[in-house]
Each structure stands twice: as C-alpha cells, then as structure tokens.
Image: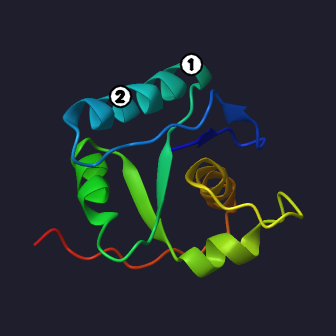
C-alpha cells in the first residue's frame, strides 16, 4: 500500500498488507485514517484487480467505510511512466496504483454487489 497526496507526493514508505492478518489490515486502516486527519482530505482506495485475491481486502476496506475502486492492471501499467526501467515489485506497483488513482478521468472496474 502507498498513500499519495493530490500533488503526487507520497506519505511514508509503501508497506505490505497481508489480507489474512488482522493486525496488518488494522494497521492499513490506521495509516489511512492518520493521513486523512493530518492532511484534511477524504481518502480514496484503489486496488489493482488480481483475480480474486484483492476481494477480501476490498470488502474489508469497504466495511470500514472507505471509498474503494478496482483498477484494471492494464490501466495501471499503461498509465504511468514513473521509471524507464522495467522495474516490477509490490512497492513500486503500489506507488503506480496510487498515482493512477489521482487521475480524475480514471476508469475503474465495476465492483460486484456485496452478496
């Protein structure tokens, strides 16, 4: 997870959320809420579609009251030119997704109903 401000600056370092670890999920919620309070901004969460693996975290964040959207990985890959090298790792990818989420014309995937 990475947290980006509207000006494209990042808050802190990216960190890993383990969807099966309640402490990890709660830490993510705490960091998002701290950023909201510190910068007086409403958060928007963007998760890259990863088959079904993003769904537990998506549901958890939605249950906590966050505005969540799902991004197609092709959009994430094609929408940013952060680095000319073919760098690919979770930390770098989370930064790319955060920056893509700042784009007001971003097309997100349809999120299925809770049922």
Q: Horizontal and vertical percent for residue 114?
A: 16, 68
Q: Horizontal and vertical percent for residue 94?
A: 58, 52
Q: Residue at x 56, y 53 (%)?
A: 90
Q: How many numbered marks have been drawn onto this rendered protein structure?
A: 2
Which residue, given by chain and number where applicable, does mark 2 sit on?
Answer: 27
Q: Quadrant of the C terminus?
A: bottom left
Q: Is residue 95 left or right of residue 49?
A: right
Q: Horizontal and vertical percent for residue 110?
A: 38, 79
85, above or below 42, in the image: below
Q: Is residue 22 left or right of residue 57?
A: left
6, above or below 73, in the image: above
28, above or below 50, in the image: above
Q: Is residue 81 left or right of residue 13?
A: right
Foreground: 70 or 91?
91
- Which corner quadrant of the image does residue 86 belong to? bottom right
Which residue, given by chain and number where applicable, does mark 1 sit on?
Answer: 38
Q: CA distance from mark 1 to mark 2?
A: 16 Å
- The kind of secondary structure element at disc 1 is helix
- The kind of secondary structure element at disc 2 is helix
Return the residue found at the far left. 115
Q: Horizontal and vertical percent for residue 104?
A: 67, 63
Classed neighbour count for the residue bearing mark 2: other residues with Cα under 10 Å, few (<14), some (14–19), many (≥20): few
Return the residue found at the far right. 84
Foreground: 112 or 16?
16
Give the mark nearer the N terminus: 1 vs 2. 2
Classed neighbour count for the residue bearing mark 1: other residues with Cα under 10 Å, few (<14), some (14–19), many (≥20): few
- Which corner quadrant of the image does residue 58 belong to? bottom left
Q: Residue at x 50, y 41 (%)?
A: 43
Q: Residue at x 62, y 31 (%)?
A: 13
Q: Residue at x 28, y 49 (%)?
A: 19
């Amino acid at each position: 997870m990475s947290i980006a401000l509207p000006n494209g600056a990042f808050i802190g370092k990216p960190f890993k959320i383990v969807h099966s670890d309640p402490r990890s999920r709660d830490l993510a919620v705490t960091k998002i809420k701290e950023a909201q309070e510190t910068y007086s901004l409403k958060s928007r969460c963007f998760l890259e579609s990863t088959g079904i693996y993003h769904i537990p975290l998506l549901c958890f964040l939605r249950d906590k009251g966050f505005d969540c959207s799902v991004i197609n990985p092709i959009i994430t890959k094609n929408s940013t030119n952060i680095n000319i090298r073919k760098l690919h790792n979770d930390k770098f990818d989370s930064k790319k997704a955060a920056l893509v989420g700042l784009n007001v014309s971003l097309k997100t995937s349809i999120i299925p109903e809770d049922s």
